[in-house]
Each structure stands twice: as structure tokens, then as C-alpha cells.
Amino acid sequence: MTKQIDIKIRKASVLGSSMAYREAGAQNAPVALFLHGNPTSSHIWRNIMPLVSPVAHCLAPDNIGFGQSDKPDIAYRFDHVRYLDAFIEQRGITSAYLIAQDWGTALAFHLAARRPDFVRGLAFMEFIRPMPTWQDFHDTEVAAEQEHAEAARAAFRKFRTPGEGEAMILEANAFVERVLPGGIARKLSDDEMAPYRAPFPTPESRRPVLALPRELPIAGEPADVYQALQSAHAALAASSYPKLLFTGEPGALVSPEFAERFAASLKHCALVRLGAGLHFLQEDHPEAIGRSVAGWIAGIEAVRPQLAA
């Protein structure tokens, strides 16, 4: 079990809307910025932040439209970029460790490409990347996983189809009720699911959830997101800041085999194999992730004065 550390839930005024965020750790410590994906919130980091807070000032925002943050009348395309930028400015963050999963990695990569000096290090898992073909989405080299991968591709094609996506995500709440639990190896209790269900009680409230599968950069579409992520990944490949990549078995967006090759292609990237896991690895391996991130940050901070000398 993770140890009990007081995590505060606070609000910040960002671009005319309220953004909720979780906070733990000493304010004079280096910042660790936790970035979640779809359809989750900062709640997904609840068992990881207490393990990292002894070595970092932990901040985990709810992306606009998610968790306890407001749902302004925006398109929810890649709007999260400007809201995250404004949150960082509002909180006065000048550098940070980025810890990210799913769409949080797209935000992290995009931020790091634009502001490499901001990044003290990047820890990431189940990440978003430009996928040249649909076969690259949920790609697996394990024969036993092929059927599941095909089903995932079929579902996401429907999510991206006008009319079908609305019926599945807005009306049936499929992303929260099916995709989320389907991406976790263990079974969540109703009490554990409640904070994930709470932000999306009505079809209209689920529009941010619908937007993001349509933003996934697959087969060149959407063109602007695809190009932005290509540029961000090129910057990631050229970067020299420390990196930590977590992988689960069999994974979802990222297979262990792909993760190993990807980590080897980057500079200063360590790979952590978590064992059995799908997409939302934070729910299956919070302790391993938290302890690994804490040790990684502590190790980097221990040598930073030497590097600066």
C-alpha cells in the first residue's frame, strides 16, 4: 500500500475557466508535473503522488473538460496545450519533471519540444505517437493479442465516425464504462470507478471524451495534430534530458517490444518493465511507478549541482 500523504485539491483560474489540480510535497522542491489522459483525471495519480512527494513538489492538473475542471464551450481539439501553458504560467513553474500517460504524453512531448530547458526529466508510459497506418494502432507482435488489437481498432474507427462516435461515447458512455475498465488488468470496484464517472453524468458533459479519439494522429489524420506530434517526436529523439519509460505486458498503445526499441532509440532513457498491464498502468502498478519515479528524480537531483559546476 502507498503511504498516506496529504494531497490537497485546489483550483486555479486559467483562461477564464477554473482548473482543478492536486498538490503534494514541499513547495521549495523541484516540481513534478503529472499529466493524465482520456477519460481520466488527476485522480489516476492519487496513489503515485504520495511516493514522489518526499522528493518533489507534485502538481497534477485536471485537463480542461476533465475531472473537476470546468468544461468551457471549446472544440476540445488540442486546446489542452494552451490551457496547460496557462496553468504552468499561473502557478509560476519555471522547470519540472514531466510524468505522463496517454494524451498527457502528447502534451508533455509538445511542451518539451517548445521549451526543452523547462524539462528536468520525462517519465512516460502508453504514449501517443504519429501512427502511419491503422495497423500501428494497438500494434502487437504477440499472436494471442491480435484479436484484441483488431477489436480496439474497430472500436476507435467507430469513435471517429460521425454519428457512431456520438452514440457510443455521448449516449452510451462507452469510453468511461468500457474503454477505461478494459484498459486496467485488475477490476475496479464501484467506489473506485465513481470518481471517473462523476465528471461525465450527461451526454453533453462527455464531449471532451469524444473529441480526443478523433484527435489521435493515425494515417495522417487529423493533419495538424499529426504534424505537431511528428515535430514533437523529432525533438524528443534529439533531446538529451533524462527519460524513464514504463511498459506493461502486453500493453495497449505500446507493446513491450516496441517500448524496448523506442527506449533504445532515445538518449538517456531507462526502461522499466512493470509486468502485467494494459493502458492505464497507474491503476495496476502505482507503487512500482511511484517508487521508480521518486528514485529517478532523487538520482538526477543528486548530480545536478555537479553538472552545473
Image (cartoon, rainbow, N blue to C red):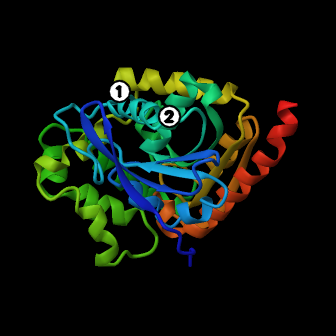
Which kind of residue does numbered mark 1 sit on? Glu
Which class describes the residues within 10 Å of circle 2: few (<14), some (14-19), or many (20+)?
few
> Could you say which is closer to the camera, residue 50 or residue 189?
50
Q: Quadrant for the N terminus, please.
A: bottom right
Residue at 61 percent of width and 30 percent of height = 118
Q: Which residue is mark 1?
A: 221
Q: Is residue 175 above or below residue 275?
A: above
* Residue 277, disc: none
* Residue 141 at x, y percent in the picture: 58, 52
* Residue 255 at x, y percent in the picture: 57, 52
Asked if disc 1 and disc 2 are in contact, CB closer than 8 Å, the reply is no
Measure the C-alpha gap from mark 1 to mark 2: 35 Å
Secondary structure of residue under mark 2: loop
Residue at 50 percent of width and 41 percent of height = 105
Which kind of residue does numbered mark 2 sit on? Gly
> Could you say which is closer to the camera, residue 14 or residue 172?
14
Q: Which residue is mark 2?
A: 92
The mark nearer the N terminus, 1 or 2, is: 2
* Residue 98 at x, y percent in the picture: 57, 43
> Could you say which is closer to the camera, residue 274 or residue 293?
293
Secondary structure of residue under mark 1: loop
Find residue 148 and report its image quarter.
bottom left
Give the left or right position of residue 114, taking residue 264 as reference.
Answer: left
Q: Is any atom of residue 280 visible in this view?
A: yes
Q: Quadrant for the C terminus, please.
A: top right
Which class describes the residues within 10 Å of circle 1: few (<14), some (14-19), or many (20+)?
some
Residue at 75 percent of width and 35 percent of height = 267
Q: Is any atom of residue 140 visible in this view?
A: no
Residue at 50 percent of width and 67 percent of height = 47
Q: Is residue 273 above or below residue 309?
A: below
